[in-house]
Amino acid sequence: MLLWPAVTLVGFVVLTALVIAMGTSTTARYEREQRAAAGTATRREAAPAAVAVEPVGMARAA
């Protein structure tokens, strides 16, 4: 009689734990990628490029 409510409750708890675990690992990966990108951008700014970069959308002078 109480079997199905118990199974439902256990299933809900298990699925909730799974969603939390997946969200935690995804957030950790996202933060690692952001830190890596920030480190790369900092290194890029420290050493200026040897080529001139033309801004996108700018009209050329006549």
Image (spheres, rainbow, N blue to C red):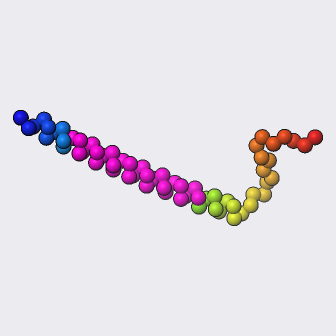
The image quadrant where one finds the C terminus is top right
Place residue 2 in its image quadrant. top left
Give residue 50's position: percent from left, percent from top. Answer: 78, 57
Please report the bounds of the magenta region as a residue range: 11-38
Q: Nearer the viewer, residue 58 or 48?
A: 58
x 13%, y 41%: residue:
6
Q: Nearer the viewer, residue 62 or 43?
A: 62
Give the prevailing secondary structure in the magenta stretch.
Answer: helix
In the displayed structure, does residue 33 sit left or right of residue 58?
left
Answer above or below: position of 40 versus 18: below
Give residue 5's position: percent from left, percent from top. Answer: 14, 37
In the displayed structure, does residue 8 sit left or right of residue 41?
left
Residue furthest to the left in view is 1
The image quadrant where one finds the N terminus is top left
Answer above or below: position of 60 versus 21: above
Q: Nearer the viewer, residue 39 or 15?
A: 15
Q: Is residue 6 magenta?
A: no
x 87%, y 41%: residue:
60
Answer above or below: position of 49 versus 12: below
x 78%, y 40%: residue:
57
Residue furthest to the right in view is 62
Answer above or below: position of 18 versus 36: above
